[in-house]
Image (cartoon, rainbow, N blue to C red):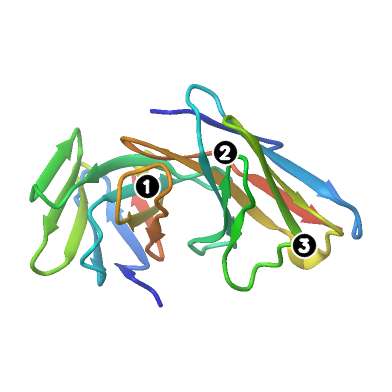
Amino acid sequence: QQQVKQSPQSLIVQKGGISIINCAYENTAFDYFPWYQQFPGKGPALLIAIRPDVSEKKEGRFTISFNKSAKQFSLHIMDSQPGDSATYFCAASTRETSGSRLTFGEGTQLTVNP
Amino acid sequence: GAVVSQHPSWVICKSGTSVKIECRSLDFQATTMFWYRQFPKQSLMLMATSNEGSKATYEQGVEKDKFLINHASLTLSTLTVTSAHPEDSSFYICSARVVGGAFFGQGTRLTVV
């Protein structure tokens, strides 16, 4: 059963625009929500993560918005650049410990046109 | 962030042979490592959870005799694809978690010819 649903599947944005990727989860026990960026032929790289005790977290051009009641969270990329073109995955887990597995969304292929 | 090193980054092998992929945590000790498989344009599929000093836990549908996992130390886990066949061709990625996040290796592109 897919527990984290991600949309859209693909996204095309102009340089300087805002990219928005959304995720929804079902398991209310999830308490750690990271976003990963993956370039072709590379492993995913941790971008930013949030816990449900805050509604927003910002790091540079990347912002996570979190809505606990709606069980949704989203990634906003401000001033999108061609170098941001990659696949983005949201994920969730129940505990931020070494043995806790991540459940991933389906991924979003982001293309930023120059 | 923590560094996870995976080797090799790509490998081509003949059908019927075995291939070993190594995953090392460089600046931390990982009691648990995760092995994923990723098909083109798809998400990461968890294959197994590797626990130091004990047997790995495999996900449903993953053949434990084909995908041998060894986690003999706190910094090294290996995945061996035994008797590889073309359908085993894929991108394999390892991961380890620390407080602060889960970090991934660079991935290994396996091509079985």
- Labels 3 and 2: the sequence-earlier one: 3
At x 58% / y 29%, what residue is drawn?
Answer: B75
Q: Quadrant of the N terminus of chain B?
A: top left
What residue did someone put label 3 on? B65
Relative to A11, does residue B20 appear above or below in the rendering?
above
Residue type at mark 1 is Tyr
Q: Where on the picture, by quarter, is residue A20?
A: bottom left
What residue did someone put label 1 on? A36
Relative to B82, does residue A85 appear above or below in the rendering?
above
Labels 3 & 1 near each other (Cβ < 8 A) = no
At x 55% / y 38%, what residue is drawn?
Answer: B105
Q: Nearer the viewer, residue A51 or B110?
A: A51
Q: Where on the picture, by quarter, is residue B21?
A: top right
Residue B87 screen position, x and y as percent: 76, 67
Q: Residues within 10 Å of mark 3 (few under 14, many from 20)?
A: few
Residue A75 screen position, x and y as percent: 22, 52
Tag 2 and tag 1 share a subunit: no
Q: Is residue B2 visible?
A: yes
Residue B77 screen position, x and y as percent: 64, 39
Tag 3 and tag 1 share a subunit: no
Tell me: A39 left or right of B112: left
What residue did someone put label 2 on? B106
Tell me: B60 left or right of B65: left
User: Quick one: which residue is furthest to the front in this view?
Assistant: B54
Tell me: A30 left or right of A91: left
Q: Chain of mark 3?
A: B
Tag 3 and tag 2 share a subunit: yes
